[in-house]
Amino acid sequence: MYSLLFTSALPGEIKVVKSMLKTLDNKIKIEFLSTWIWSYKTILNLAKYLSENKYDFLVNIWICGYLKEKSLFQVARISNIHNWKELLIPIPFKFLSLDSIACSENIVYDKKNLQDENYVDMESYWFELVCDDFKIPRIILKVPYDEIWSTETKEFDKDKLDKLLKQIDYNKLIEEIVKFLEKHKKDKIDFSKYFEHYKLTFSEKLIFEKMYYKYVSLVWENFDKFFEENKTLSKKEFLEELGVI
């Protein structure tokens, strides 16, 4: 039985998602977590919960602010609005149209703060950091709700949000997650030939495995082909080449 965790900021939104998922296959165990609003709340609550509970896949669904192109989307890149560092999100499968988002520690009222980004939220950057640290497959889905610098940002319409959340095809989402997990389960990876070729140390093996999954998630190519084309490189050169992907 696969174990999935759906996270959102507030209990109200989790309630809507839960109601949409209640008729699913009983071979799938689905649990729900409210991390609450604010970046540091997300970090503390999610990290604590994942340290005590194990899951095969995580789904984060929550609202974001927007400037234009108001439609549901899947996050592929996140920019930290305070230092403009970027995170590329592994894409286990394409469920919605892919887009980037800015992440802020504070509510954004001025569109000038976003530079070239169309969307902004307060937790996706931190959600991704925690999930990456725990090495859990995940997907971040965003519901554009508030128009930046308008009165929408200062008002909350629960009925409007519930309607937007119900636009997600949850059955298809679960099907895609299970398909991904089944494929991943069947593809048992033997790292020994890579480890032996480069005589990797214990710490280097951990780094290599993390880089391997990053490569597979972002590039979607046969890793053996990449390895054969680059195995004449030194260990340092190969790891650097792998880390650039």
Image: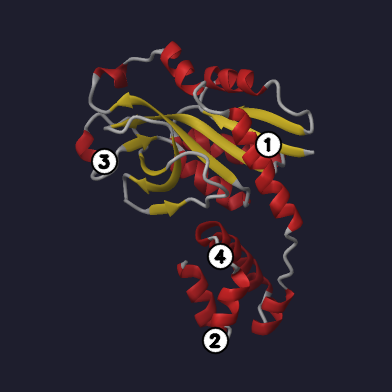
Distance (Cα) linking label 3 and label 2: 41 Å
Does dot 1 land on a helix, a strand or a loop?
A: strand
Give whichever of discs 4 and 1 has the lower sequence position. 1
Residue 4's tag is 1
Q: Residues within 10 Å of mark 1 (few under 14, many from 20)?
A: many
Amino acid type assigned to the residue bearing label 4 in the image: Glu
| 38 on left or right of 135 | left
**Pointer 2: what residue?**
234
**Pointer 3: what residue?**
114
Residue at 75% in and 29% down: 25
Closer to the eye: label 1 or 3: 1
Residue 178: name its quadrant: top right
**Pointer 4: what residue?**
221
**Which x, y percent locates residue 202?**
68, 72
Closer to the eye: label 2 or 4: 4
Distance (Cα) linking label 4 and label 1: 26 Å
Distance (Cα) linking label 1 and label 2: 40 Å
| 17 on left or right of 27 | left
**Which x, y percent locates residue 195?**
69, 77
Does dot 4 land on a helix, a strand or a loop?
A: loop
Q: Residues within 10 Å of mark 4 (few under 14, many from 20)?
A: few
Residue 125: name its quadrant: top left
Q: Is residue 70 visible?
A: yes
- Which colour scheme appears in the figure? secondary structure
**Which x, y percent locates residue 153?**
30, 22
